[in-house]
Image (cartoon, rainbow, N blue to C red):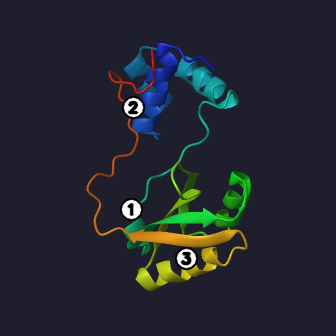
Amino acid sequence: MELDRLDRDIIGALVEDARATYAEIGQRVGLSASAVKRRVDRLRDRGAITGFTARVEPTALGWTTEAYVELFCAGKTSPPEIGVAVARHPEVVSACTITGEADALLHIRATDVRHVERVIERIAAEPFVVRTKSSIVLSRLIDTPLIVTHNESPFPP
């Protein structure tokens, strides 16, 4: 899927402020509100924009503890199989396959260390999990969401 400069600028404006009006975005990128709406609709139809969300501070919801857990799986456990299993745990906020000895890396958010322990125990009980290795986050040094600015895009030209 090819995106032109205007598409990238519109996406950048939406990433920065998904609540911006089409008129505000249009002013920023040099289009009318109706032209921005047509482009946003097209970007959604093509799958370039997959949705709009709110960023919430996890501690406001009581999720004060986080951990990263490496999963070591038996045999040829497929990534979809891992994904389906870990998606059943609401505390798993992201999961990915990785290089190295582990098969997957999970990011867990929980209310406290005991809660993290219970989540790891549930995940370790999955039939394909051989072992886990976990690290508790002490403090976040950098926590930057992807922000695309009007003048500086992470997308290649």
Gap between marks 2 and 3 measured at Cα:
35 Å
For the residue labelled by badge 3, is the local secondary structure a helix, a strand or a loop? Answer: helix
Label 1 vs 2, first from the N-terminus: 1
Question: Which residue was labeled with disc 3?
Answer: 120
Residue 53 seen anywhere in this rendered image of the structure: yes
Above or below 96: residue 63: below
- Mark 1 vs 2: CB contact within 8 A: no
For residue 32, say whether it is visible: no
Q: Which quarter of the figure has residue 120? A: bottom right
Q: Which residue is mark 1?
A: 57
Between marks 2 and 3 in the image, the one whose residue lies nearer the viewer: 3
Q: At x 64% / y 27%, what residue is drawn? A: 41
Mark with earlier residue (3, 1): 1
Task: Look at mark 2 in the image and give the residue it sits on.
Answer: 148
Q: Quadrant of the N terminus?
A: top right
Give, as a three-letter code, the residue at label 2.
Val
Give coordinates of residue 141: x percent, y percent. Answer: 26, 56
Which x, y percent locates residue 115? 49, 82
Q: CA distance from mark 3 to mark 1?
A: 23 Å
Q: Secondary structure at mark 1?
A: loop
Q: Give above or below for 11 relative to 120.
A: above
- Residue 13 point in image, percent of width and height: 42, 30
The residue positioned 68% from the left and 27% from the top of the image is 46
- Circle 2: element type: loop
The amino acid type of the residue labelled 1 equals Glu
Residue density around tag 3, few if under 14, some if 14–19, many if 20 or more, within 10 Å: many
Q: Amino acid at mark 3?
A: Ile
The span from disc 1 to disc 2 (Cα, nearest Å) is: 20 Å
